[in-house]
Amino acid sequence: MLRFLTDENIEGHLVKGLLSKNPNLDVIRVQDVGLRTAADPLLMDWAGRNNRILITHDISTISPLVYERIAAGQPLPGIIFIQTGMALGIVIRKILQIAATDQPEAWSGRVEYLTK
């Protein structure tokens, strides 16, 4: 089962929408684990140690960190970048499809961009 962590820039409506469609989805917010104000490298470390795919809008600052982690051989359970302005329903559908069809090993080091 895939496990997700949403960055602080992800709207609460996304998490609520995901859980309303799939109450068994393993998704938590950075706010729920005391990482709301954590620097991006710490957030990436936590996600790696806890095998959680990070969901974020923050392409500009997190993207370089992702590729640095991959190059350094550090754990990266995966990352989903969501283009700002995407319709909430589309994002929910795409993430639920990923959760329903993929296995954790398929996400190791994987970077996915959800776009309009």
Image: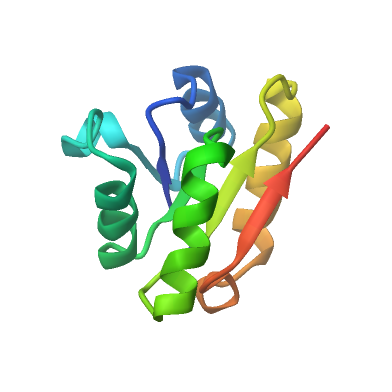
Q: Is residue 69 above or below residue 24?
A: below
Residue furthest to the left in view is: 34
The quarter of the picture where the C terminus appears is top right
Q: Nearer the viewer, residue 57 or 104?
A: 57
Q: Nearer the viewer, residue 38 or 68?
A: 68
From the top left corner, tell me how far across and down residue 31 is, in percent. Answer: 25, 29
Is 49 left or right of 60, judged from the image as shown? left
Q: Is residue 62 above or below residue 30?
A: below
From the top left corner, tell me how far across and down residue 41 is, in percent. Answer: 30, 51
From the top left corner, tell me how far across and down residue 105 is, in percent. Answer: 52, 78
> Which residue is painted at 67% across and 55% down in the image?
112
Q: Is residue 10 above or below residue 108?
A: above
> Which residue is painted at 45% across and 25% down in the image?
9
Q: Is residue 109 above or below residue 13?
A: below
From the top left corner, tell me how far across and down residue 115 is, in percent. Answer: 78, 38
Q: How is the image coloured?
A: rainbow
> Which residue is painted at 49% across and 20% down in the image?
11
> Which residue is painted at 28% across and 62% down in the image?
50
Tell me if I can see residue 70 in this picture. yes
Q: Nearer the viewer, residue 60 or 77?
A: 60
Total tally of numbered discs in the picture: 0
Tell me if I can see residue 77 in this picture. no
Q: Nearer the viewer, residue 77 or 98?
A: 77
Is 5 left or right of 112, judged from the image as shown? left
